[in-house]
Amino acid sequence: MDNKLVHHLLWERLRVGDKDAFFDLYKALYYPLVNFGIRVCADADISSEATDLVFTTIWEKHETLNRVDNVEAYLRTFLKRKLLRILERKRKINDALFNAGAEGDWMEMSYEEFIVKVQSDELVRYQLRNALEKLTFRQKQLIHLKFFDGLSYEQIAEQTNQTIKTAYNTVYDALKILRKELKA
């Protein structure tokens, strides 16, 4: 059987909740999608992150997925949109950092002060990474949607098939855990 047909059959099984079909589709298309993403954005880490998000999303929404004739082309388009959102978010962060730096005193810092600032920033990133490890997968996902993708609670609820109250409570609980971990 040709790959297009195999992917189509796996997609149809995935739509009805077949986990084995999901994992088979993941195995078949993960690396081709990552490679495609690298060609789009020239960054392997970003491409891997976006590809993971694509597969996470299709599994979470498997019950509402439409029929697709060319699964790989559909997932490439989905991946390209994810990559563009991630790149746009990173651009906004870089612009904000640049603007803050242009107004701030860090450009006038001595080399020693700059090194101390960089090291303290590294410590904060390390602490944040460790704090995020304490969250459940769902909490991490909702924190990402709320604070990195900038979605409202209504949009988060719609995207994750939850109620608005559940989305709000999940984010609230995650923030409590993060605050506790970052204070320690």
Image: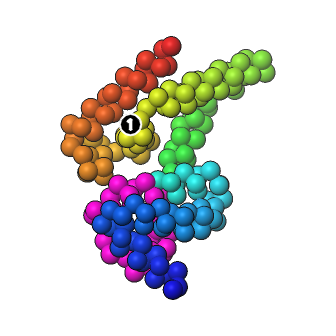
According to the picture, the residue beneath numbered tag 1 turns out to be 139
**At numbered mark 1, what does the secondary structure look like: helix, strand or loop?**
helix
Picture coordinates of residue 94 (x, y %)?
A: 58, 41
Q: Is residue 147 above or below residue 38?
A: above
Q: Residues within 10 Å of mark 1 (few under 14, many from 20)?
A: many
Picture coordinates of residue 4 (x, y %)?
A: 49, 81
Q: Is residue 39 above or below residue 127?
A: below
> Residue drawn at (41%, 35%), measured in percent from left and top?
136
| Amino acid type assigned to the residue bearing label 1 in the image | Gln
Determine if the magenta segment contains residue 68. Answer: yes
Picture coordinates of residue 106 (x, y %)?
A: 66, 24
Q: Is residue 165 above or below residue 16?
A: above
Q: Is residue 162 left or right of residue 183?
A: left
* Part of the protein shown in magenta: 54-82
Confirm whether residue 137 shows in the render: yes
Q: Is residue 149 above or below residue 101?
A: below
Picture coordinates of residue 57 (x, y %)?
A: 39, 56
Considering the whole magenta stretch, tell me its main secondary structure.
helix
> Residue drawn at (53%, 40%), measured in percent from left and top?
93
Residue reaching furthest to the front: 20
Confirm whether residue 147 shows in the render: no
Q: Nearer the viewer, residue 93 or 78?
A: 78
> Residue drawn at (54%, 64%), measured in percent from left and top?
27
> Residue drawn at (44%, 24%), measured in percent from left and top?
178
